[in-house]
Image (cartoon, helix red, strand yellow):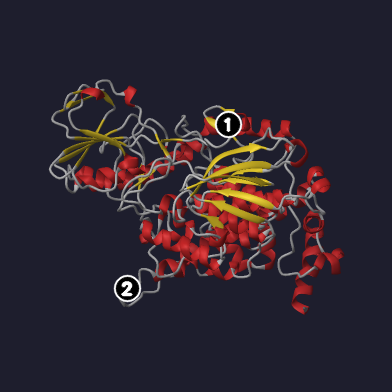
C-alpha cells in the first residue's frame, strides 16, 4: 500500500506544472512560444505566454528604481546583486567597516551586531550553502571555517562588483514612510556615519537584511540567585574561545548548536563541563553514510516526496531509529520531549564522544544559584562553579522600523511568505534572511531577494491585503502545529517546500515532468540528488547556462576537497540500487498509464501528441 501510494505521489509530482510565474522561457526551445505555439501542451504554453498579473500601482507609476539595502551580510550582498540583475539602483548601508555580517569575526563583540567565536565552523556543507550561480571553489573544505566563508562572500562580491554599492560604517537610524507614501510608496531613510553625521535619503523601496542573531537573550530573572553567583557569567554572544576556562568548572545553559560547540571546545581545557537543558535535544552528525555530508545525503526531492506521503509519526519513528542507532539518546541523557522533526536538531559530531568520555555531563534545567553552587531541577547540585555560559538564544527586532509597520501574529513578526509585511499599502518594504529551516539561510535569502526584486519591478504581484493576512495567520497555525515554537524560535519552515514556493512565484521552479521527457539524466540528478540552489537557475528569470553542468559536478566538488592523498580508487557500482530505481520508474509509469486510462483516457494520447513534436523539433534544430 505504501509503495503504491509512493508511486502515485511521485506521478503527481512529475506531472505538476510550472507555477504560473513571470515570463519564463521553455528550456531547450528558444522562443518556441513565438515560433510554434501549436506544438506545446496547454500547460507549458500557458506558462510561457502568461505573465504575472500586473500590479495596478506599478502600472500607474512604474517608479521603483532606488532601493535601500540594510546590512552587507550574506542576505544584503545577494539582495544588492539581485537589484542589479533587475535593473534597480541599490545603496547598501553597513554599520561595520567590512562586509560579511555574522561571518566577520571580531575579537571583541560589538553592541547590536552579530558575534561568532574563533573556532566556528559552519554545519551546512558548501554545496548546500552557496549561491545558485556562484559555486564555492572545489578545493574548499565541505564544512568551512568562518574565515573560508568570509573569503567566499568576498569572492562573490568582487565577481559581481557589489562593494561599490556599499556604504560602510554607516548605520541606519530610522526608516519611515514619506508624507506622500500613499501616492508614491516611498520611504525616508535616516543614516549616521561613524563621525556622527546624519543624512536623510529618499528611496523607492527598502530591503531589511539586518539578521536575527544581534540581540542576545539573557533571561537572568529565570535563574533565582544569579546575583549571588561568585564566578563569571556571560552570554554565548560574548564567547570567543576557551581562554580563561583552564582548570575551571563550567556550566553551559542551553543545548542549541552554539551551546554544543562551546561545551565541546571548553571541555578540552576545563576541569569539568556541565550542560543544562530544559527540553533535551536530538543530536545528529554532520558526517553521514559513507562519509557524505548529511545534508547532501538526505536533503533530496525524493526524501521530500516521502515527507508528503508518509505520516509524520512514521517519519519520526524512522528518523529517531536511525539517530539512536548512532547513539542512544536515552542512554546519553539527551532524549528530548519533542519528536525529531518538530525542531531543527543540534548538529554536532563531537558532543556524544565528550559525553561518553565524561568531559561533558548533561544536566536538567537550572533551578537556583547559591553563591558558587548551581542547583538543578532534579535536586542535584554542582559545587564550586567558576563560569556560567548562557547559550539561551537571541531576541529579534527591527529598531529602525516604526512599530506599526510590522504585523504581529503568535510569537512572530507576520510576513507574507516570511518576506513582505501584509498590511502595507504598497509592496515597497521587504525583509530578507529572516527565516529558519534545516538548510542554509544564504540560499533561502537569495530566493527571497529574487522574488522581492521581481515584485519591486512590477513583474510579480502580491495578493490583496486580506488574502495576505489570511495566509500569514495560516502559516502561524501550521508552524505552531508542526514545530516547537517560542518567542526565541518563532519561525520554522520546510526547506524544499519553501524554496519551491518562492521559485514558483517567479517561474524558476524546475519541472520534473519537463525534465523527465526532455533531459532524463538531469531529471535523475534533480530527483535523487541534493536540492542545491543550482536547480533554481535551470529555467525562468535569472536562468544560468552553467546550472546543468554545476548540478552534474556537485559531488565532484565535494570529493575534490578530500583528495589530499593519492589512493587506489575502487569501483562502487550499486547494481541493486540501479535495479530498484528502474523497477520504481517502471511501476510508476505503469501506474500512471493505468490511472489516467481509467479516469481520463484522453490524457496520455494528448500528452504524447504534444511532447513528441517538441522533441522532434529539438532534434532538427
Residue 525 x/y as whole percent: 55, 63
Identify the residue at horizontal 67%, vertical 50% (top origin).
Answer: 504
On screen, residue 189 versus residue 59, left or right, reads: left
Q: Nearer the viewer, residue 568 or 295?
A: 295
Mark 1 Cα within 10 Å, few/some/many (few <14, many 20+)? Answer: many
The kind of secondary structure element at disc 1 is: helix
Residue 330 x/y as whole percent: 29, 35
Quadrant location of the N terminus?
top right
Cβ atoms under marks 1 and 2 closer than 8 Å: no
Determine which of the numbered discs, if any, sits on residue 476 in the image. Answer: 1
Above/below status of 473 relative to 159:
above
Q: State the separation of the CA atoms marked 1 and 2.
A: 48 Å
Determine which of the numbered discs, if any, sits on residue 256 in the image. Answer: none
Residue 125 x/y as whole percent: 42, 57
On screen, residue 450 versus residue 366, left or right, reads: right
The kind of secondary structure element at disc 2 is: loop
Quadrant hosting residue 37: bottom right
Identify the residue at horizontal 57%, vertical 65% (top origin).
Answer: 160
Q: Nearer the viewer, residue 379 or 97?
A: 97
Identify the residue at horizontal 58%, vertical 49% (top origin).
Answer: 69
Quadrant hosting residue 236: top left
**Residue 546 in view (yes/no):** yes
Above/below status of 322 relative to 14:
above
Quadrant hosting residue 237: top left
**Residue 583 in view (yes/no):** no
Mark 2 Cα within 10 Å, few/some/many (few <14, many 20+)? Answer: few
Q: Nearer the viewer, residue 512 or 590?
A: 512
Q: Mark 2 or mark 1, which is nearer the start of the sequence? A: 1
Quadrant location of the C terminus?
bottom right
On screen, residue 152 versus residue 546, left or right, reads: left
Residue pointed to by mark 2: 564
Amino acid at each position: 500500500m505504501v509503495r503504491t501510494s509512493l508511486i502515485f505521489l511521485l506521478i503527481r509530482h512529475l506531472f505538476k506544472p510550472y507555477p504560473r510565474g513571470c515570463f519564463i522561457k521553455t528550456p531547450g526551445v528558444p522562443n518556441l512560444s513565438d515560433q510554434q505555439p501549436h506544438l506545446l501542451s496547454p500547460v507549458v504554453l500557458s506558462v510561457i505566454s502568461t505573465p504575472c498579473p500586473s500590479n495596478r500601482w506599478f502600472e500607474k507609476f512604474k517608479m521603483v528604481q532606488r532601493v535601500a539595502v540594510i546590512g552587507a551580510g550574506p542576505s544584503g550582498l545577494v539582495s544588492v546583486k539581485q537589484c542589479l540583475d533587475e535593473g534597480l539602483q541599490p545603496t547598501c548601508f553597513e554599520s561595520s567597516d567590512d562586509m560579511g555580517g555574522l561571518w566577520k569575526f571580531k575579537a571583541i563583540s560589538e553592541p547590536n551586531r552579530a558575534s561568532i567565536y574563533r573556532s566556528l565552523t559552519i554545519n551546512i556543507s558548501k554545496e548546500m550553502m552557496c549561491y545558485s550561480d556562484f559555486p564555492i571553489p572545489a578545493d574548499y573544505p565541505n564544512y568551512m571555517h568562518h574565515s573560508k566563508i568570509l573569503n567566499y562572500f568576498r569572492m562573490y562580491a568582487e565577481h559581481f562588483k557589489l562593494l561599490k554599492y556599499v556604504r560602510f560604517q554607516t548605520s541606519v537610524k530610522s526608516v519611515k514612510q514619506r508624507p506622500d507614501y500613499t501616492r508614491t510608496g516611498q520611504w525616508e531613510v535616516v543614516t549616521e556615519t561613524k563621525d556622527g553625521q546624519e543624512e536623510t535619503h529618499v528611496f523607492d523601496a527598502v530591503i531589511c537584511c539586518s539578521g536575527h542573531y544581534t540581540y542576545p537573550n539573557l533571561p537572568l530573572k529565570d535563574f533565582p540567585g544569579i546575583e549571588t553567583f561568585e564566578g563569571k557569567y556571560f552570554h554565548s554572544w560574548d564567547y570567543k574561545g576557551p581562554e580563561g576556562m583552564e582548570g575551571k568548572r563550567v556550566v553551559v545553559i542551553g543545548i542549541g548548536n552554539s551551546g554544543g560547540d562551546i561545551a565541546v571546545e571548553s571541555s578540552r581545557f576545563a576541569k569539568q563541563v556541565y550542560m543544562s537543558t530544559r527540553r533535551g535535544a536530538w543530536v545528529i552528525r554532520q558526517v553521514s553514510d559513507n562519509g557524505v555530508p548529511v545534508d547532501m545525503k538526505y536533503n533530496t526531492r525524493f526524501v521530500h516526496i516521502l515527507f508528503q506521503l508518509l505520516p509524520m509519526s512514521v517519519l519520526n519513528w524512522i528518523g529517531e531509529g536511525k539517530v539512536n542507532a548512532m547513539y542512544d539518546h536515552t542512554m546519553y541523557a539527551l532524549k528530548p520531549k519533542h519528536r525529531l522533526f518538530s525542531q531543527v536538531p543540534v548538529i554536532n559530531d563531537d558532543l556524544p564522544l565528550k559525553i561518553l568520555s565524561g568531559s561533558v555531563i548533561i544536566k536538567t534545567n537550572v533551578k537556583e544559584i547559591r553563591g558558587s553552587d548551581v542547583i538543578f531541577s532534579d535536586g542535584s547540585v554542582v559545587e564550586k562553579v567558576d563560569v556560567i555560559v548562557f547559550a539561551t538564544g537571541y531576541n529579534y527586532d527591527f529598531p529602525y522600523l516604526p512599530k506599526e509597520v510590522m504585523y504581529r501574529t503568535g510569537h512572530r513578526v507576520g510576513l507574507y511568505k516570511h518576506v513582505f509585511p501584509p498590511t502595507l499599502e504598497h509592496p515597497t518594504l521587504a525583509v530578507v534572511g529572516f527565516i529558519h529551516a534545516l538548510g542554509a539561510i544564504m540560499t533561502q535569502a537569495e530566493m527571497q531577494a529574487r522574488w522581492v526584486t521581481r515584485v519591486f519591478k512590477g513583474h510579480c504581484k502580491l495578493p490583496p491585503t486580506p488574502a495576505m493576512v489570511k495566509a500569514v495567520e495560516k502559516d502561524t497555525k501550521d508552524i505552531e502545529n508542526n514545530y516547537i515554537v517560542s518567542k526565541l524560535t518563532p519561525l520554522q519552515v520546510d526547506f524544499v517546500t519553501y524554496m519551491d514556493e518562492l521559485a514558483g512565484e517567479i517561474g524558476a521552479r524546475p519541472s520534473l515532468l519537463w525534465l523527465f521527457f526532455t533531459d532524463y539524466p538531469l531529471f535523475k540528478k534533480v530527483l535523487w540528488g541534493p536540492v542545491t540552489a543550482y536547480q533554481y537557475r535551470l529555467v525562468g528569470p535569472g536562468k544560468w547556462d552553467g546550472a546543468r553542468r554545476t548540478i552534474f559536478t556537485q559531488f565532484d566538488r565535494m570529493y575534490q576537497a578530500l583528495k589530499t592523498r593519492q589512493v587506489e580508487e575502487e569501483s562502487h557500482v550499486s547494481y541493486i540500487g540501479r535495479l530498484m530505481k528502474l523497477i520504481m520508474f517502471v511501476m510508476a509509469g505503469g501506474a500512471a498509464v493505468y490511472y489516467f486510462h481509467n479516469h481520463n483516457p484522453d490524457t496520455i494520447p494528448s500528452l504524447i501528441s504534444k511532447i513528441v513534436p517538441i522533441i522532434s523539433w529539438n532534434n532538427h534544430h
